[in-house]
Amino acid sequence: MTTAKCLIITTHYKPLVGGAQTVYDALASKAPAYFSVLTARRDYARGEDVDGWQAFDKAAGYAIYRTARMRPDLLGPRPSAIARVGSRLMARRIRREVLKAALAAVEQSEANIICIGALDALGWLVEPLRARTKARIILYTHGEEISQKAYSDKADAARGDALRAADAVIAVSQFTARLITEKYAVPSERIKCLGNGVDLERFRTRPSENVRVPLGLGAGPLVLAVGRLVARKGFDRLLEAWSKVLAAVPEAQLAIVGKGPLEDALRQAAENASLKGSVHMLGHVADDILPSLYASADVFTMPNRTMPDGDTEGFGLVFLGAAAGGTPGGGGGAGGAVDAIRDGETGLLVDGEDASAIAFALTDLLTDEVKRLEMGDAARAHALNQGWADKAGELLAYLDSLLDTSKGAKRGGD
């Protein structure tokens, strides 16, 4: 059997914070001899070089190749016609540079598998890499790039072309896998469902450090919410629900961790007099503190929902993090959250649009200690069976099997 050596290509990477880069780093860190990464030095969202990328790459333990850019910088909310034309011209030049960098990285890493992330930005790489390398080409999908409406019919068609042309597609949830088949007619046998994992080294022993005091939290029952402050996470509905929770559990407190475009609006809502100062907007919390914060909470919640344009939660890494800390989760019954939470066993799923349903679920867990503790134990047991080392092994076994299939035998359009 041929052994897989996988080059992951992604538009942005650690030390930037985000779900996809966390997944790729976790997989590569557990099997550094078999994974490498090609990414950009530049953060396209800010239009600046990524702070600390050299130090991160040096310490990573696996090979990371960087090119200047993987895509043009984001334009402002109302770009001029000149700016749009300039961005399109820049995109053409960047594509040439990215393809050149990809071919060089394939040669240097001796990759026989090329794993492309960021479907919308990098899906175009599938065909030229098929033509210029002997590697098998796969796409790694995280959910929202499948569920969210593309910005044009042409872009949507390009998604489908890339998905069907690849040798295989990795999906982080059954929800994502089904959607790929339904929307883009990719045969289910060419989709590998690989759920996200947990860093067991951080959670093997249940964290016990008291982080409440340094974070300004009291001793009362604590509901914790962690995530980027965007609409699909449902934190606005959570704040709408919170007064109902306080009516049943007056001493309860809510801590929201994260940054994002809705931060100002959420802070304003949290300061409403009816919430009696019980809501703590913590902003960014360091990665090394999060395990103890998860473990110190009584209930975790992120009442995610699907937005009108299809944007939804592909999986929800935070649910597994909380579960590993022994904390039951409350999530929205949308997207891949239904894969991350076992409803009624490791937590509760509700309609993320319904503030009353959110309040009822949180109150139920806060007031029923037996249920809460049983669900917390079940959540931790489930999470500790989802280690990244096992996920990396499962992925590599699948990639090995792809190499034993004659190249192109199952590719769309062949």
Image (cartoon, helix red, strand yellow):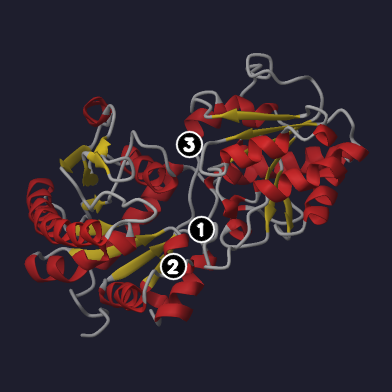
Q: Quadrant of the N terminus?
A: bottom left
- In the picture of the structure, the residue carrying the numbered disc 3 is 199
Q: Which mark is residue 60?
A: none
Can you say which quadrant of the picture contains the C terminus? bottom left
> Which of labels 3 and 2 is toward the front?
2
Q: Is residue 327 visible?
A: no
Q: Please, what secondary structure does the residue beneath circle 1 have?
A: loop
State left or right for residue 78 relative to residue 354.
left
Residue 308 as seen in the image, left or right of residue 405: right
Nearer the observer, disc 3 or disc 1? Answer: 1
The image's mark for residue 146 is 2
Q: Nearer the viewer, residue 216 or 365?
A: 216
Using the rendered view, name the quadrant where residue 406 is placed.
bottom left
Q: Residue at x 27, y 81 (%)?
A: 412
User: Residue at 17% across / 41% down in the picture?
Assistant: 66
Of the image marks 1 and 2, the number of the one nearer the N terminus: 2
Bin the neighbour count of mark 3 within 10 Å (Cα to Cα): few under 14, some 14-19, many 20 and up: some
Q: Is residue 175 above or below residue 316?
A: below
Image coords of residue 216 (percent x, y)? 68, 18
